[in-house]
Image: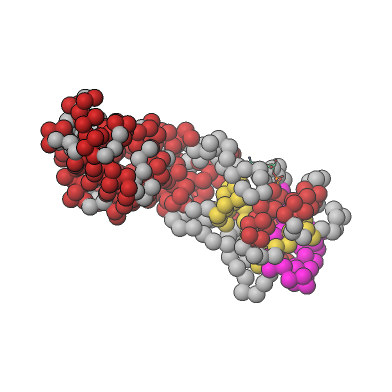
């Protein structure tokens, strides 16, 4: 998995902070030191790292992190936002010509994935009901034309080729004419690559550029090559005015440096990310999603968003106080079920929480009206004392409750197990939110 090392290091750093009810300035500085190291080890450009840390610190001071009720979460939120900014902020979409065809010129070093990506891009455009034309301008790499033709066949897209004896500039010119005559609304020009950037290559690319006047010049870079990819992007950009970057091989164990530095260093947005050899493994690049993914907490963030928008804050605080003082009762359990229900299917919620898949009891909860009615009946058949102390519920009491509520002992057992798991879940949730039940908190 891409970013694994970086993700696990960052998660470690934040794991320590999240558990704390209060953080000191020293804690924040220590965390920032560790984030800095993690980024450098992920091969992020050192200038980029320096600026990044400075921005995070500035925001942290601005937001008075230390005084916040959940300092750990606030810092993660800041880092998440800055990472998103670093990668371009918002999604950068493909340009569109006023008058078709939209011409996309693909450039890149040999082996970066240019030809494969041209095919993938054509496929993506087809999905949007477009009619792309692929153009084989790489006449130097022996198999390149054939490779593009095979890709074209695979997806049912036309490939324009004039063999390997015609000048690529001529091929490109003829291809645009061909596209116009055949109603192709996109033209994807696969150009030649080299093992290293050289003058002849650049000259040819410039000539093609001048001839086809592309709406997009996309540089394909191999994310696995880290800083090298960023250097390549810088030199291409200085000569060819790139409009965007495609990062390939994000499915490999890339450390992430290229993804995190290329926008900051070159100013070119990442427009697409390729995550596999298959033809449909190209995706529009979303900086925010990538940031969450690197932080290993995309789902946690949406979970917190869900919680914030659906759960009554006062009630939640009251529940938390009860948990802390071990006052959480079966009545609260009922109330909690109703609250959780507002957030959506419980199994999906559990999947969003790290470590939650271990709680089998909760997985079986079906939070529908019937189930709530049954739980209500069981809870009402308990004495006041029993409601607060599940330990009291021996076999004969369970039998009595089952009889009183019109359910079975198995139903009662299941509910008690779920109650226990719910208590565990609340503890964990509260510790993830940096609450007082965290490992270093009040308990
Ligand atoms: P070009 O020389 O730039 O045209 O590179 P190719 O398109 O021929 O790709 C070089 C190699 O990288 C091929 O074996 C591709 O299958 C592989 N490749 C391209 N993109 C990806 C990707 O996103 N993930 C993986 N794992 N392999 C890729």
Residue 90 in sight here = yes
Q: Quadrant of the C terminus?
A: top left
Q: Residue at x 47, y 52 (%)?
A: 287
Residue 289 drawn at (x, y percent): 46, 50
Q: Residue at x 47, y 33 (%)?
A: 5
Residue 178: quadrant of the picture: bottom right
Magenta residues, as a range?
167-193
Colour setup of the view: secondary structure
- Above or below, comparing residue 316 to residue 354 in the picture: below
Residue 51 drawn at (x, y percent): 39, 47
* 253 sits to left or right of 385: right
Q: Residue at x 16, y 45 (%)?
A: 318
Magenta region includes residue 314? no
Residue 74 drawn at (x, y percent): 28, 46
Residue 325: quadrant of the picture: top left
Q: Residue furthest bottom?
A: 99
* 325 sits to left or right of 179: left
- Above or below, comparing residue 362 to residue 119 in the picture: above
């Amino acid at each position: 998995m891409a970013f694994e090392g970086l993700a696990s290091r960052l998660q470690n750093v934040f794991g320590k902070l999240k558990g704390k009810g209060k953080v000191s300035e020293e804690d924040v500085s220590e965390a920032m030191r560790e984030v800095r190291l993690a980024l450098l080890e992920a091969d992020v450009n050192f200038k980029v790292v320096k600026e990044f840390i400075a921005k995070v610190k500035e925001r942290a001071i601005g937001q008075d992190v230390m005084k916040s009720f959940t300092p750990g979460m606030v810092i993660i939120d800041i880092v998440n936002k800055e990472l998103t900014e670093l990668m371009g902020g918002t999604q950068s979409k493909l340009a569109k010509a006023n008058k078709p065809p939209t011409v996309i010129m693909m450039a890149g070093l040999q082996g970066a994935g240019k030809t494969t990506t041209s095919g993938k891009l054509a496929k993506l455009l087809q999905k949007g009901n477009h009619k792309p034309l692929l153009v084989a301008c790489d006449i130097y790499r022996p198999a390149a034309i054939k490779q593009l033709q095979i890709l074209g066949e695979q997806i049912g897209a036309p490939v324009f080729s004039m063999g390997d004896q015609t000048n690529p500039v001529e091929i490109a010119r003829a291809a645009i004419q061909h596209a116009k005559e055949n109603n192709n609304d996109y033209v994807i020009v696969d150009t030649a690559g080299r093992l290293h950037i050289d003058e002849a290559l650049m000259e040819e690319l410039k000539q093609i550029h001048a001839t086809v006047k592309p709406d997009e010049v996309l540089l394909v870079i191999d994310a696995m090559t880290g800083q090298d990819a960023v250097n390549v992007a810088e030199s291409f950009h200085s000569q060819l005015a790139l409009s965007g970057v495609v990062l390939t091989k994000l499915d490999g164990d890339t450390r992430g440096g290229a993804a995190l530095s290329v926008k900051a260093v070159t100013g070119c947005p990442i427009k697409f990310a390729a995550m596999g050899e298959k033809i449909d493994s190209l995706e529009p690049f979303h900086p925010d999603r990538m940031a969450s993914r690197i932080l290993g907490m995309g789902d946690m963030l949406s979970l917190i968003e869900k919680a914030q928008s659906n759960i009554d804050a006062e009630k939640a605080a009251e529940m938390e106080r009860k948990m802390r003082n071990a006052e959480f009762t079966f009545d609260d359990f009922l109330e909690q079920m109703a609250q959780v229900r507002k957030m959506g299917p419980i199994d999906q919620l559990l999947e969003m929480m790290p470590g939650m898949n271990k709680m089998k009891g909760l997985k079986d909860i079906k939070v529908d009206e019937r189930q709530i009615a049954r739980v209500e009946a069981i809870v009402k058949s308990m004495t006041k004392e029993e409601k607060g102390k599940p330990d009291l519920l021996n076999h004969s009491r369970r039998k009595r409750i089952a009889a009183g509520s019109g359910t079975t002992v198995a139903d009662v057992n299941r509910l008690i197990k779920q109650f226990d798991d719910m208590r565990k879940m609340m503890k964990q949730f509260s510790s993830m939110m940096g609450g007082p039940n965290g490992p270093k908190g009040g308990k």
